Image (cartoon, rainbow, N blue to C red):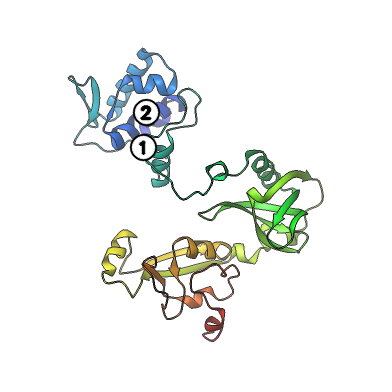
C-alpha cells in the first residue's frame, strides 16, 4: 500500500522501482544505479531518472556518498511505502520481486531450518494450479489422495480456501466421500481434475460451521515463567494479554504452531511453553484440537 498520494500518477513499473529504492535504503542503508540496472534490466540513464524522482518525492530520505559513490539512508528517513513485516522478511530472505531479470537472491544471510525437505516446502505447482482454478471457478475436483488411515484412494472434493498451518499447505474443502468439511494436505494430492458436477449449498463455504465460527483466544505468558514481562514485550501484549481471533477450523494449528498450553490448569512443563490460553472454554465445540498442546476435552466439557 502506497502512503504518498503523489505516487498515484506514476506508472506501476516505475512505482516498483521506487519501492526497490525505498526498501534497500530502509533495510540495507544504501542503493545505487547498478541495483536498479541489475534488478530490472533497465539502462543506467533510466535508473538515474528513477533515483532523481525518488529524491523529489522524499528529499530527506537519502544523501549521496561521494566516496562510496552510492546513495545512503539519511537520518531523517521516513519510508515512502507501507509494507507488511511478512513481505519485508520474505524479500530479505528470498529476494525482491518475481522478475526473471536478476533471479532470486537473499539480501541478507538467512536460514529457514524448519522444513524437513526443501523440495516439498511448497505445494506442487501443477496440483496447486488445479486447486486454485476450482476455487476461483467454484467447481468440484477429483483427486488421488493419500491419507494416513486409508492409504491411496480417489476423492471428490469441493475446495474453497488455501490454508497455511505453519508447517505445510492444506486446502479447505467439502469431502463428498465422508460428507463433511475437512482439510486436505496439498502434497498428498495427485492427478487433480476439474469436474462439471453441480455444487449444492451444503457443499459450499457458507455451510462450513467451523470455518465461519470465529474464536477469540486470550493468550498470556505461561504462569511458570520467571520473567513474564519478556514474553509480554516479545508478542506485543496489552495489559499482559494478547487477544486474537481465528477461525475455529484453524484454531488447532495456531495453538500447536505457537506451543500454547491449552490445559485448564497450565500444567504443561518445558522450556518450549511460553504461552498459556487463559480462556480455555472458548475452545468448546472446536473440532481440530487433537493437535493442541495439553488440550483435554473431558476437562473442557465439565466447565460448560
Vertical position of residue 116 compared to residue 36: above or below: below
Count of all numbered marks drawn on residues in the image: 2
Q: Which residue is mark 1?
A: 81
Q: Which residue is mark 2?
A: 18
Q: Position of residue 198 (x, y in %)?
A: 81, 52
Labels 1 and 2 touching (C-beta < 8 A): yes
Would residue 43 appear left or right of 300 to someone viewing this image? Answer: left
**N-term-proximal mark, 1 vs 2:** 2
Label 1 neighbourhood size at 10 Å, few (<14), some (14-19), many (20+)? some
Q: Nearer the viewer, residue 199 or 231?
A: 231
Vertical position of residue 147 compared to residue 104: above or below: below
Q: Quadrant of residue 10?
A: top left
Please say whether residue 284 is visible from this viewpoint. Answer: yes
Label 2 neighbourhood size at 10 Å, few (<14), some (14-19), many (20+)? many
Q: Secondary structure at mark 2?
A: helix
**Which quarter of the image is occupied by the N terminus?**
top left
**Which quarter of the image is occupied by the C terminus?**
bottom right
Q: Position of residue 128 (x, y in %)?
A: 64, 43
Q: Residue furthest right?
A: 197
Q: Secondary structure at mark 1?
A: loop
Q: Residue at x 40, y 26 (%)?
A: 17
Q: Position of residue 69 (x, y in %)?
A: 23, 19
Q: Residue furthest bottom?
A: 302
Would residue 219 appear left or right of 197 to someone viewing this image? Answer: left
Q: Residue at x 65, y 44 (%)?
A: 132
Q: Residue at x 53, y 56 (%)?
A: 165
Cα distance in 3D space between marks 1 and 2 = 9 Å
Q: Nearer the viewer, residue 265 or 80?
A: 265
Amino acid at each position: 500500500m502506497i502512503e504518498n498520494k503523489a505516487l498515484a500518477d506514476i506508472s506501476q513499473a516505475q512505482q516498483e522501482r521506487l519501492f526497490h529504492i525505498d526498501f534497500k535504503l530502509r533495510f540495507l542503508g544504501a542503493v545505487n544505479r547498478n541495483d536498479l540496472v541489475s534488478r530490472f534490466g533497465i539502462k543506467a540513464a533510466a535508473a538515474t531518472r528513477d533515483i532523481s524522482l525518488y529524491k523529489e518525492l522524499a528529499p530527506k530520505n537519502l544523501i549521496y556518498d561521494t566516496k562510496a559513490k552510492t546513495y545512503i539512508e539519511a537520518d531523517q528517513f521516513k519510508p515512502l511505502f507501507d509494507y507488511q513485516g511478512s513481505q519485508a522478511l520474505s524479500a530479505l530472505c528470498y529476494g525482491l520481486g518475481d522478475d526473471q531479470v536478476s533471479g532470486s537472491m537473499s539480501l541478507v544471510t538467512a536460514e529457514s531450518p524448519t522444513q524437513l525437505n526443501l523440495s516439498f516446502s511448497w505445494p506442487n505447482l501443477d496440483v496447486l494450479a488445479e486447486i486454485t482454478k476450482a476455487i476461483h471457478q467454484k467447481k468440484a475436483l477429483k483427486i488421488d489422495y493419500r491419507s494416513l488411515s486409508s492409504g491411496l484412494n480417489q476423492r471428490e472434493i469441493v475446495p474453497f480456501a488455501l490454508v497455511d498451518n505453519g508447517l505445510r499447505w492444506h486446502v479447505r474443502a467439502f469431502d463428498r466421500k465422508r460428507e463433511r468439511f475437512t482439510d486436505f494436505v496439498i502434497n498428498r494430492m495427485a492427478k487433480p481434475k476439474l469436474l462439471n458436477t453441480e455444487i449444492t449449498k451444503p457443499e459450499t463455504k457458507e455451510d462450513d460451521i467451523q470455518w465461519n465460527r470465529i474464536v477469540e483466544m486470550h493468550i498470556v505468558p505461561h504462569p511458570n515463567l520467571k520473567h513474564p514481562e519478556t514474553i509480554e514485550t516479545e508478542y506485543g501484549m496489552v495489559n499482559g494479554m494478547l487477544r486474537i481471533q481465528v477461525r475455529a477450523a484453524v484454531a488447532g494449528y495456531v495453538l500447536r504452531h505457537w506451543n500454547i498450553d491449552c490445559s485448564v490448569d497450565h500444567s504443561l512443563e518445558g522450556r518450549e511453553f511460553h504461552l498459556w490460553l487463559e480462556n480455555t472454554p472458548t475452545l468448546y465445540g472446536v473440532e481440530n484440537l487433537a493437535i493442541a498442546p495439553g488440550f483435554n476435552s473431558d476437562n473442557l466439557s465439565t466447565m460448560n
